[in-house]
Amino acid sequence: MKYQEWQKKANRFVAMTGYRVEKFTELLPYFEAAHAEYLSEFHMNGKRRKGVRAYTLYTNSPLPCMEERLAFILSYLKLNPIQEAHADLFDIEQKQCCQLIHGLREILYQALEATASVPAQSDAQLQEVLSGRTSEEEKILLHDGTEREVPRPQDEVEQASKYSGKKKRHTLKNAVLINCCCLVLYVSPTFAGRVHDKKIADVSYCIPQGFTLAQDTGYQGYRPDGVRIVQPVKKPRGKELTEEQKQNNRIISSFRVRVEHAIGSIKRYRTVKDECRLRKNLFVERVFILCAALHNFRIKDKPFTYENKLT
C-alpha cells in the first residue's frame, strides 16, 4: 500500500500528502467517522442509497483501508495528477479513481468540518466568527485576493469574464481573510478572474467596527466605517515618496506579507495552484475552501508567531 510505503520516509510523506505522519494520524479518526456516516446514506458516486445502513469496507474494495483512502485524496489534492496516472499509482481503474476523488473529497470536507477547521463562507458566518473577539490582537485582520488557473472556456462570454489581465490567462478568484496568526477565517465565493479584489470585498463581506484591517494598494478606496485601515502609501504619478513614507511602507508590508504566506500555504496543494481540470460536482469552485481548511488544520495547534509592528 502507498500509505505504508510513504510513511517509511518523513520527507516523502509530506511531499506526497502535504501532511506530516503525526498530523495525518490526528486527522484519520475524523475522516473515518465522516466516511462511515457519508457511505451509510450515499454511494461513492454521490447517489443516495435506497436504505440507510452501515457501510462495510471489504478487503477486495478499491483502497481497502482508511489510511489508504485518506492518503489517496490528500495526494490527489497535493499533486494534481491526471486521473490515469493517479489510478495507476494506487493500482485501480480510472473510473474508480474518478468516483473516489469526488466521493472522498466530500468525506474529507465533512471530516474537516468536525475539527472546526473550515473557514466561514458567508458574511453571516464571518460576523459570528468575529463577534467574540475583544483583545487588540484578535481584532487585527488581513485580506487579499488570489487567482488560480482554469482551462480556457469555449464560450466567448465566459472567456471574456474569466480572462485575467493581471495573470494573462483564464482564472477564478477568491478573497481570503486571515487573522494575525495566519489562520484563514473567511473564504469568499468563487468569482471570475476579471473581477477586481475591491469589488469582491464590497459585495461579499464587511468588517465590523473597531477592527484593524491590513491590505495592499489594490484595495485603494476600500474603507469600511469604523475600521482602521493599514495600507502602504501609493507613489503619486510623477513624484517620489519621502523616506519616512518608504520606511512606513516597509513596516506595513513586512506585516501584511503574512496573508501571502497563508495563501502560499494553501497553494501547497497543486489543485489550487496549477490548472484544475475537473468540472463535475462544482469541484473547481469548492476545492479552494477544502485546501484552506487543510491549511487551518495543519497550523491551528502551532500557529505562525506574531509580532505587532503596526502603530
Image (tube, rainbow, N blue to C red):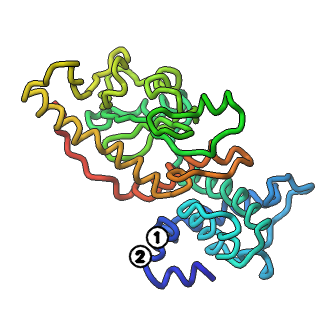
Picture layout, residue 231 above or below residue 6: above
- Label 1: which residue? 15
Residue 239 position in % (x across, y down)? 15, 19
* Residues packed near mark 1 inside 10 Å, few (<14), some (14 to 19) or many (20 plus): some
| Residue at 42% from the left image edge and 32% from the top image edge | 130
- Specify the quadrant that holds the C terminus: top left
Q: Are marks 1 and 2 in contact (CB under 8 Å)?
A: yes
Kind of residue sitting beneath label 1: Ala
Disc 2 packing (10 Å; few <14; some 14–19; many ≥20): some
The amino acid on which the numbered mark 2 sits, given as a three-letter code, is: Asn
Q: Name the secondary structure under disc 1.
A: helix
Q: Nearer the viewer, residue 114 or 310?
A: 310
Q: Nearer the viewer, residue 173 or 106?
A: 173
Please identify the quarter of the rendering in which residue 161 is found: top right
Q: Is residue 102 visible?
A: yes
Q: Looking at the picture, tell me which residue is in the foreground, 253 or 169.
A: 169
The image position of residue 310, as x and y in percent, is 18, 34
Measured in 3D between alpha carbons, the distance from the residue under mark 1 to the one under mark 2, in whole angstroms, is 6 Å
Tell me if 298 is positioned left or right of 179 in this view. right
Q: Which mark is residue 11?
A: 2
